[in-house]
Image: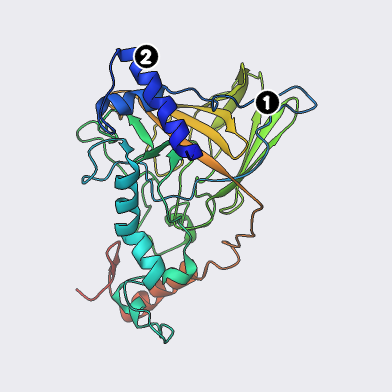
Amino acid sequence: MTKLSAVSLVVVAMAIATTGHAFAQTGPDVDKAAIAAPNVEPGYTVPRLAIGQPDLQGVWSNASNTTMRRPPSMKNLVMSDAENDHARDTNPSNIRQKTDDNQTGEKLLDGKDLQSGRGYNAFWIDPGSSYSNVKGTWRTSWIVEPANGQVPTKPGKAGNPYGPRLGNGYDNPEERNLNERCIILGTSGPPIGNYLYNNNLRIVQSPNHVVIESEMIHDARIIPLNAKHQPKEMTPWMGDSVGWWEGDTLVVETINMTRGGSSVQISPEGKITERFSRYNKDQVFYEFEVEDPSIYSQVWKGQMSLNAMTGMYEYACHEGNHGLLGILEGGRAADRDGRNISEDGDREE
């Protein structure tokens, strides 16, 4: 019996204990049991640092085919092994990574694929090539509540999670969003997300602080423990975070955010709560909860596995940000030609 199968049977056994009956391999009962399964793998002893804290330190990755929202073609949160195999083999991202959309053969790509609007061919991306296994079950989305795996945005409240574009977007760098300016991508959260590449993060602990450093742009969240929030006038890029330990789980509460991580829309009055638990020697179990009544019809929640990695790489976003230079040069070219330029691009009217 494989380790995964053993863990999956533990989840099934828990559901039998709580509902009084067995159930099919997938479905609402399986989803509920998987969500409620223990945060620590049965039989695993959580290691501790010399300072007494549970050991969350290391480099971790959430590279995965699993995404924040559940795809329309997937009904349930949990997939069976057979469903996971089929989803992995037919996932467009995986096909692209293997074959560059069936363009590769004996010859290397010559760049013609970029003319169809693709900024990268598969050589340059590293989004992950398998669905995430969270607490022993294959997951179709990070969102676990609502049960449909969708963000419960109120009607008329959907907006740009990166903030509004100022002016026409082509006159100066400050008119572009924070991503395009390489100031922050929100990969370290809150909440933590997964992207096209650079999905690694490093956790460092001390008696009074925890640091979460993202490989993407090397954003670093410095989280004081057992501290009070800063005055509301202080608006750090990644919000005002404080943390504390509840047993072996690190809890982090973040308020007063300029923007949320993982493309999550959040208002200045919103709050995101995260929980980190050492699931086994190879995984950290990560949970998040988004509360913002001005945007969402309910509190919504997610679960994720962070998998052990050996290290992180340099990410030179500012140094290689030729796109921003090209955007501004396009605006000046339009000015010289006496043409209008808009958010839709540089075009003649």
Point out residue 252 in the picture as x, y percentages from the top left corner.
56, 26
Residue type beneath disc 2: Ala
Point out residue 91 in the picture as x, y percentages from the top left corner.
32, 57
Q: Secondary structure at mark 1?
A: loop
Q: Secondary structure at mark 2?
A: helix
Q: Nearer the viewer, residue 315 or 123?
A: 123
Q: Is residue 177 above or below residue 27?
A: below
Q: Is residue 251 something one can see in this rendering? A: yes
Q: Badge 1: how crowded within 10 Å, few (<14), some, or many (20+)?
A: some
Q: Is residue 178 left or right of residue 141?
A: right
The residue labelled by disc 1 is 54
Q: Nearer the viewer, residue 35 or 262?
A: 35
Q: Residue furthest right?
A: 50
| Separation of residues labelled 2 and 1 (CA atoms) | 29 Å
Q: Badge 2: how crowded within 10 Å, few (<14), some, or many (20+)?
A: few
The residue labelled by disc 2 is 17
Q: Is residue 293 something one can see in this rendering? A: no
Q: Is residue 109 above or below residue 186?
A: below
| Among the two numbered marks 2 and 1 on one chain, the one whose residue lies closer to the N terminus | 2
Q: Nearer the viewer, residue 1 or 80?
A: 1
Please tell me whether mark 2 or mark 1 is closer to you in this view. 2
Point out residue 157 in the picture as x, y percentages from the top left corner.
25, 35
Which residue: 34% across, 76% down?
334
Which residue: 31% across, 51% down?
87
Quadrant location of the C terminus?
bottom left
Which residue: 36% across, 47% down?
164
Asked if the residues shown at circle 2 and circle 1 are in contact, with their CB atoms under 8 angstroms apart, the answer is no
Point out residue 200 in the picture as x, y percentages from the top left corner.
57, 49
Q: Quadrant of residue 262?
A: top left
